[in-house]
Image (cartoon, rainbow, N blue to C red):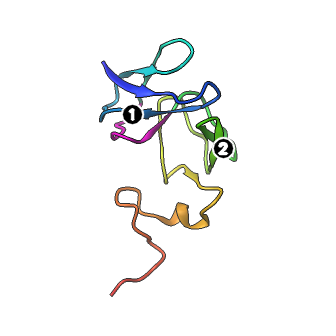
Amino acid sequence: MKRSFKIHNSDNVATLIEDANAEPVRVLGATQETVISLIENVPLGHKVALSSIEPGGLVIKYGIPIGVATRGIHPGEWVHLHNCHSQVDERSSTLDIETGAATDTVYE
């Protein structure tokens, strides 16, 4: 079974330790080991929601808010630029979901 890691007990996301498809994934590091069923493919190093996050709700990692949901996020869903934005970097929601490149700047 593929693995993810929950860093802090209050986190509502876990980080994938390896690429995973839409499949059950073990969540390590939590108070009690659990399993979350991914509803889509999630790349290595990316976050997956462990519980529902309402629009405007905080994305919590390391025990602190790292972003805000721009729409509802379901358990097992990939948490990334397409459904949340940084509280620190206002441009984060304009970045390309695959490459992270800015989409609001024209390069010639």
The numbered disc on residue 63 is none
Element type at marker 1? strand
| Residue shown at the point (61%, 65%) measured from the top left | 90
Residue 50 versus residue 68 in the image, above or below: above
Which one is in front, 19 or 73?
A: 19
Q: Residues within 10 Å of mark 1 (few under 14, many from 20)?
A: many
Per the image, the residue denoted by label 2 is 65
Tell me if label 2 and label 1 are in contact, CB under 8 Å. no
Residue at the extreme top: 32
Q: Is 1 on the left or on the right of 59, as rendered?
A: left
Coordinates of residue 108 in the picture (x, y in percent): 32, 88
Q: Which residues are magenta?
A: 39-48
| Helix, strand or loop at mark 2 | strand
Q: Residue at x 53, y 30 (%)?
A: 7
Residue labelled with disc 1 = 16
Q: For the stretch drawn in magenta, what is the main secondary structure? A: loop
Q: Nearer the viewer, residue 58 or 29?
A: 29
Is residue 46 shown in magenta?
Answer: yes
Between residue 29 and residue 49, name the one nearer to us: 29
Looking at the rendered image, the quarter that the N terminus falls into is: top left
Image quadrant where residue 44 sits: top left
